[in-house]
């Protein structure tokens, strides 16, 4: 199932996206998408709605330097244990929304990533049970003010600006862990390929990440874990369009504007 969150003529709703291409339909989900969703019977052509961020998480957890080639391009070694940090929920925007460049940064980079969406409250999840707590997967862009990251020596300001966490276009459920661990990931800027990799190259795999993070904090339904970005990150400029495509999950596209 593809679970999206839309603005429609009468408000905002979670929906299941059915069909393909121009014939896609949004079927309204009653209440929330966790557990076994039920449907209201209301439907809209997807083209008549606007896709929003598919979830508004209580928190966004991120994993740094989780591809060896990206760790190398950043001038460091890949960590032996996962390095985690957080982005505020206020950084989340949906597909088609603008990434807004802050006036006090001279370089803002794209970072295309596979994102995990948690489906139930959980704590101390062993890796062997990780699949049981996953609602599905979506696409993320871990936008980063690179100059601020280097200046601060830690990542909160650089990663936390409003609009610095595009998510979407939807959450894809029913994806097996083995499948999620081998998906092609590609990022383009104005159509030019910048990142071209595969999630098989993750250093710390999805079950390990869920086990590691859930030892530290309780995860709640809708929380999002960004799994890291491969090599090829680079700067964005006003007027550009950046797209992250992950095999079987879709494409997340955002424009770039000044704040």
Image (cartoon, helix red, strand yellow):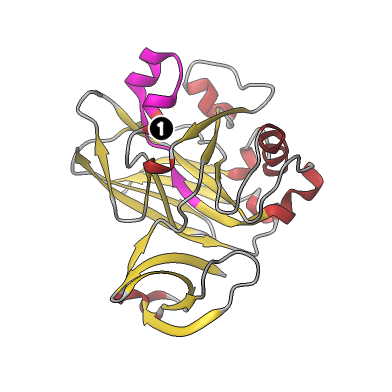
Q: Give the camera-side residue of 90 and 66.
A: 90
Rendered position, 219 above or below 179: above
In the image, residue 151 lies in the stretch drawn in magenta: yes
Residue 208 placement (x, y as % from top left): 72, 38
Counting other residues with Cα less than 10 Å from the Cα at mark 1, is it few (<14), some (14-19), or many (20 or more)? some
Q: Dividing the picture into quarters, in which one does residue 124 lie?
A: top right
Magenta range: 139-158
Residue 3 placement (x, y as % from top left): 51, 66
Q: Dividing the picture into quarters, in which one does residue 150 lie?
A: top left
**Horizontal relation, residue 33 to residue 191: left or right:** right
Q: Dividing the picture into quarters, in which one does residue 12 lie?
A: bottom left
Quarter of the image for the C terminus: give it: top left
In the image, residue 228 lies in the stretch drawn in magenta: no
Quarter of the image for the N terminus: give it: bottom right
Rendered position, 153 above or below 85: above
According to the picture, the residue beneath numbered tag 1 turns out to be 233
């Amino acid at each position: 199932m593809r679970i999206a969150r839309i603005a429609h003529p009468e408000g905002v709703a979670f929906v299941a996206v059915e069909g393909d291409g121009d014939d896609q339909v949004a079927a309204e989900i009653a209440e929330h998408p966790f557990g076994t969703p039920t449907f209201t019977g209301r439907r809209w052509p997807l083209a008549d709605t606007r896709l929003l961020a598919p979830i508004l998480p209580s928190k966004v957890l991120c994993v740094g330097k989780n591809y060896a080639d990206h760790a190398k391009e950043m001038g460091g070694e890949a960590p032996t244990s996962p390095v985690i940090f957080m982005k505020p929920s206020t950084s989340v925007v949906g597909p088609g929304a603008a990434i807004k460049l802050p006036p006090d940064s001279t370089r803002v980079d794209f970072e295309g990533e596979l994102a995990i969406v948690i489906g139930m409250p959980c704590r101390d999840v062993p890796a062997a049970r990780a699949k049981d707590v996953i609602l599905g997967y979506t696409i993320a862009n871990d936008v980063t003010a690179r100059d601020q990251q280097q200046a601060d020596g830690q990542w909160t300001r650089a990663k936390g600006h409003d609009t610095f966490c595009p998510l979407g276009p939807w959450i894809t459920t029913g994806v097996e862990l083995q499948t999620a661990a081998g998906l092609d990931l590609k990022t383009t800027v104005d159509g030019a390929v910048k990142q071209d990799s595969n999630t098989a190259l993750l250093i710390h795999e999805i079950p390990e990440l869920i086990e590691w993070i859930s030892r530290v904090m309780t995860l709640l339904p809708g929380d999002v874990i960004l799994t890291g970005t491969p090599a090829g990150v680079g700067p964005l400029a006003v007027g550009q369009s950046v797209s992250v495509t992950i095999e079987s999950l879709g494409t997340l596209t955002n424009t770039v504007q000044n704040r």
